[in-house]
Amino acid sequence: MTSEVQARKRDLIGYGRRPPKVVWPNGAKVAVNLVINYEEGSEHYERDGDSHTDGLAELNWAYGKDHRDFAMEAVYEYGSRAGVWRLLNMFDDYDIKCTFFACGMALEKNPEVAAAIGEDGHEPCSHGYRWSTPTDFKTPEEEREQITLAVESIRRTTGSRPVGWYWRYSSTPWTRDLLVEEGGFIYDSETYNDDLPYFTDVNGKRHLVVPYSQTYNDVRFILAEGSVTPDSFYDMLRRGVDELHREGARGYPKMMSVGLHSRWTGQAARANALRQFIEHSLAKGDVWFARRDEIARWWIDHSHEWER
């Protein structure tokens, strides 16, 4: 296997000033993908033998191994007990199918959520077996083992295997090589570098990248001590879809990824901001709410038809 340290070069040019004139289904001017990062129960936790306990729990303290942090646990539990169902019920209201960046272990610990993904037509995209930090992997073999573990776990709990991949934080130098080698993935989202999918070459094979976003992401509720409010989050999302819609109206449709976490946006006030965004987008018209794998398959099947 060729190391991606050599094979994966930076591309600072992309489509440049000649982006493709994308044609989405029904002539949509922007494709919107809603993503639930489902991690609850798979996070780093010292009492499970991990080196540290994950933070980002809306709490400004952290305990060591000698003290069980019931408060931190409760924040994560809210996402799997209540938040995820609030979001899924909302999506049902508008007949929207979302993508789950799902950790295999998290779904194993809540089989009802896994069943809902499969039964209700949402996409299980692998977020690893655990909510891991890829830089902890020392060898490609260790990461390959985790990829296999995640695929089999998600297939078992949801009824279908993931065809997309997104690691926490950033991939390793060999992640993309391993995904292509595995053979069952049609895309990965291991980057934030564009508003459109694009093909890249991995060891002589064409591979699709569907970029994700940290801009339209509810992590903003937690960073900077929660300075982002539901109003400001809605305003960011609204401005994003409005501007992308304008670009689509000029003949250059784009895509927009909205990153959500059930323990954060699953809270009622924040969920209300998401509802405002959905209703605003639907009222504009020509907005295609789609699963990530739907966008990927459309791109694979039709991108050769589009003028650049």
Image (cartoon, rainbow, N blue to C red):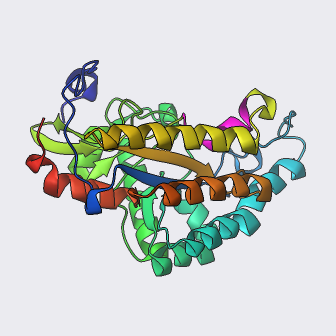
Q: Is residue 202 left or right of residue 212?
A: left
Which residue is painted at 63% across and 69% down in the image? Answer: 90
Task: State whether residue 132 is above or below residue 268.
Answer: above
Task: State whether residue 301 is above or below residue 117.
Answer: above
Which residue is painted at 29% across and 38% down in the image? Answer: 250
Q: Is residue 165 left or right of residue 20?
A: right
Q: Is residue 148 left or right of residue 252?
A: right
Q: Is residue 88 or residue 135 the one in the foreground?
A: 88
Position of the N terminus by quadrant:
top left
Task: State whether residue 1 is above or below residue 106.
Answer: above
Q: Determine if the magenta segment contains residue 294.
A: no
Task: Determine the image quadrant of residue 142.
Answer: top left
Residue 48 appears in view = yes
Start and end of the magenta stretch? 215-223
Q: Residue furthest bottom?
A: 119
Q: Position of residue 199 (x, y in %)?
A: 19, 40
Q: Position of residue 127 (x, y in %)?
A: 48, 51
Which residue is painted at 24% across and 19% down in the image? Answer: 13
Q: Is residue 52 or residue 117 the one in the foreground?
A: 117
